[in-house]
Amino acid sequence: RKEVEQDPGPFNVPEGATVAFNCTYSNSASQSFFWYRQDCRKEPKLLMSVYSSGNEDGRFTAQLNRASQYISLLIRDSKLSDSATYLCVVTWGSGNTGKLIFGQGTTLQVKP
Amino acid sequence: ETGVTQSPTHLIKTRGQQVTLRCSSQSGHNTVSWYQQALGQGPQFIFQYYREEENGRGNFPPRFSGLQFPNYSSELNVNALELDDSALYLCASSLGTGSYGYTFGSGTRLTVV
């Protein structure tokens, strides 16, 4: 079983749609959780951290369920500029060894 | 405040050769991690350096080695290059364990022929 699993997609949605991405992780000792965005042939960029209480940043909402080891990202009112690959990321390690474990990424294509 | 910079941006090497990739961490960050991203995959952790010491390593053979310098910049060295080493190599810096996220450089795209 992969340490972090995502549906690779692609998700093809029209502008204005709401789309949800899911992610599961295998290590219950995972400490921090993030969603990163990666545009084609570019580096990953932090989209948002994910907290147990859930958190929202504009059109983006992230949720974490530690009991189910499940993370989600909801994008409302999709824009053309949201087209990218979304990477689910967890960290685990003790002391200063918080390495990032990436999922395969979910590709989103927003169409006019 | 400068971000993470990597050099070179692109590189073509022949199988069996050695390569050194360089990374300057973001100002104030003392931890540097290296990742390998093959086409269509998520980045895979290679190793991490904290205050010049390696303090975490992924499932990569010993021919992948690194250094971190007193100014927290870092190098990734790969010996005896293989075709499967062709990938985007990403450097990420953070403060401590990265609980507040990591900043990535734009990567070095290595092609082994």
Image: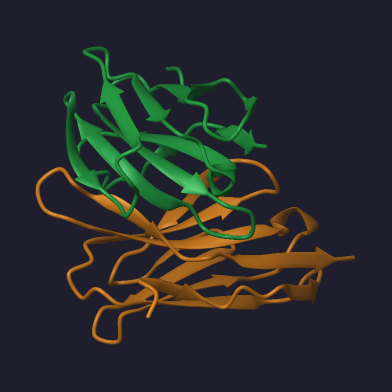
Chain colours: A orange, B green
Q: Which residue occupies the extreme right position in the image?
A: A112
Q: Is residue A12 above or below residue A35?
A: below
Q: Which residue occupies the extreme bottom position in the image?
A: A68
Residue A12 locus on image (x, y percent): 78, 74
Residue A74 placement: quadrant: bottom right
The residue depicted at 28 percent of the width and 71 percent of the height is A52
Quarter of the figure that contains the C terminus of chain A:
bottom right
Residue B26 locus on image (x, y percent): 38, 23
Q: Nearer the viewer, residue B63 or A37?
A: B63
Quarter of the figure that contains the N terminus of chain A:
bottom left
Residue A84 locus on image (x, y percent): 68, 57
B35 displayed left or right of B56: right
The residue depicted at 75 percent of the width and 53 percent of the height is A81
Q: Which residue occupies the extreme left position in the image?
A: A95
Q: Is residue B74 above or below residue A7?
A: above
Say how many tags the image has.
0
Q: Is residue B96 above or below residue A80?
A: above
A17 displayed left or right of A46: right
Q: Which residue occupies the extreme top position in the image?
A: B71
Residue A60 locus on image (x, y percent): 54, 64
Residue B69 placement: quadrant: top left
The residue depicted at 61 percent of the width and 73 percent of the height is A8
Q: Is residue A107 above or below residue B87?
A: below
The residue depicted at 25 percent of the width and 79 percent of the height is A66
